[in-house]
Image (spheres, rainbow, N blue to C red):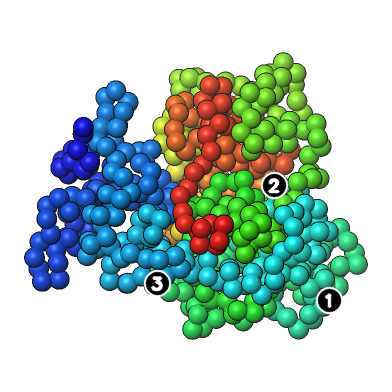
Amino acid sequence: MPEAIPALSAPLASSAFSDLDRHFARFIGRFAEGSAGVAASPLRKEWLQCAAAALSQAMRHGHICLHLAHPPAEWPAGKEGESAFRWPSLSEWFEHLSPAPAVTLARQGGTVSPCTPLTLDESGRLYLSRYYAYEQAVALALLQRSATAGQAVGPRFPEGQEEAREAALSRPFFIISGGPGTGKTTTLVKILTQYLTQYSDHRIALAAPTGKAAARMEEAIRNELGKEPSLLPLAGRFPRAQTLDGLLGTRPMRAQPWHHAGNPLTVDLLVVDEASMIALPLMAKLLAALPPTTRVLLLGDRDQLASVAPGNVLGDLAEAAMDNDSPMAGTLAILRKNYRFGNESTIYRLSELVRDGDAVPALALLEESQREAKDDFAFQPLPAPAELAEKLRPVILKEYRPALLTADPAAALEAFGRFRLLAAVRQGAFGVESLNRLIEELLREAGLLPPRRGGYFAGMPLLITRNDNALNLRNGDIGIILPDPSEPEPADGAPRPLWAWFPGEAETGPRRLSPSRLPESEPAFAMTIHKSQGSEFQRVLMLLPDRDLPILTRELIYTGLTRARTHVELWAPQELLAKGIARRTERHSGLRRALGS
């Protein structure tokens, strides 16, 4: 029988582990020495190091914790496809880890020692202690809020806008989940209108995880108010939407934001849009900064991609709310009726099939779209890398030409926002890094782009990838590089200076910034589907990779499809598309258990 934990040179040498996993394992191994400096047995040290490496690996794959009762899918496999190293039983893990100086044993809902880097709960979940503390803090804060509303009656949860509005106004914590076009913003405006009517002196805060999502939230609310003239007198009382980092006062190089339990926010109702993007640490800090009396309303789509960071907070909360035996029961409404797409819309039908994991009818719908042209959808197999440039050329020139032919920054931003190429991955021939270079070459060959000047060129779209409080720029903001049309041409014939333009106020127009002052950014002709969350475009071209990858899941495909308002074109290998639709994102955590589900 293979040994349970072999020497470090065996499993940790596997390509399944990264250098970061190995360094973390060695770091944790140093804790195997007792307080008196006496080294623990080499066997116990190896157990501890292998557990630490597997935990690091699990967190890289999006899990909050490592459930020791089940061998990870990424555990090193043998040549015959079987496990090369037997995964120990849960009792064996407890036997070897429970006395380890690096590990704290925690009862459900218990606190952990800040002096140990790892925490093992009673069900066998191994955590970084910081993440265990985040999880417990989120659960405690939500259970306290849910308890004040009393027990929900019956297993049913609201599915209509009016029911959702009534439920949200009656509970201190509530979630409204629904896909694009299901009326989340309409419901929100009704909730805010009634709330402001009832509580005229209460303070409301609107927020989203990214700058782009906050801007979309504000724009959607403004558009909804414009549809109903009777609501216009209340429009001035609706606050500006901001990022969660901006709301909390997140500070560079500091773990604790400006607002925390000792310096809470002064807000009576907090509304957070695109809640699926909220990572566990941010959710813990947000709830800690709220007074106990603050009502919390989360909006999002539980079927979308979770945050890039480990965990799936909105998904866990929704699952707990759907359990009638959980204290969270009654805190969720799911809006299902779609008002944007008709029932015959191919985008709507396909996204529903993908969401439910129905690969066979989804592929049949793709074949139907190839036989019969659809107004809102087109599909073709992924071209070979050598053919990609010629296949992309007509699409790229048609879609980006309007943005590149105008000298007006406001018009360029508006035109550029109508279309986006979305990809699943960053590297490879079908990754955003290669695609951005290829698109730049195609546009320059067509005479639509000038040469680069100091890393920038006129017409270059930018995606901000790091927050900058001083410039009021957030991760996810999109701008464009252009000269200022109001500046005269230099007398010596030199080109005019380039500026970075970002959406601004409706009254003042786009904001102008010097490119040299910008935080980290990247070209944005093509974006990853992850980065597109919180955005909407009139038209989308989505490319999936040419090989099967764990990232290719139904949640990723669904998110990409639902970024478009009017038209989607999908290029993908059918076999891999079917595998992706069948694959569901699994992210291990103990949050549902901590919430009593």
Q: Amino acid at mark 1?
A: Thr
Spatial CA distance of label 3 from label 1 is 42 Å
Q: What x and y, as percent, mark residue 377? A: 70, 29
Q: Earlier in the sequence, mark 2 or mark 1?
A: 2
Spatial CA distance of label 2 from label 1 is 28 Å
Judge by depth and name the residue closer to the eye, 331 or 182.
331
Q: What x and y, as percent, mark residue 249? A: 51, 74
Residue matched to label 1: 197
Judge by depth and name the residue closer to the eye, 505 or 291.
291
Q: Residue at x 45, y 28 (%)?
A: 548
Q: Residues within 10 Å of mark 3 (few under 14, many from 20)?
A: some
Q: What x and y, as percent, mark residue 515? A: 47, 57
Q: Earlier in the sequence, mark 3 or mark 1?
A: 3
Mark in the foreground, 3 or 1: 3
Can you say whether 60 is above or below 505 in the image? Answer: above
Mark in the foreground, 2 or 3: 3
Q: What x and y, as percent, mark residue 295? A: 67, 73
Q: Residues within 10 Å of mark 1 (few under 14, many from 20)?
A: few
Q: Amino acid at mark 3?
A: Thr
Task: Give the SS element for disc 3.
Answer: loop
Judge by depth and name the residue closer to the eye, 531 or 441.
531
Residue matched to label 3: 111
Task: Give the SS element for disc 2.
Answer: loop
Can you say whether 376 is above or below 5 in the image? Answer: above
Can you say whether 470 is above or below 90 in the image? Answer: below
Q: Amino acid at mark 2?
A: Gly
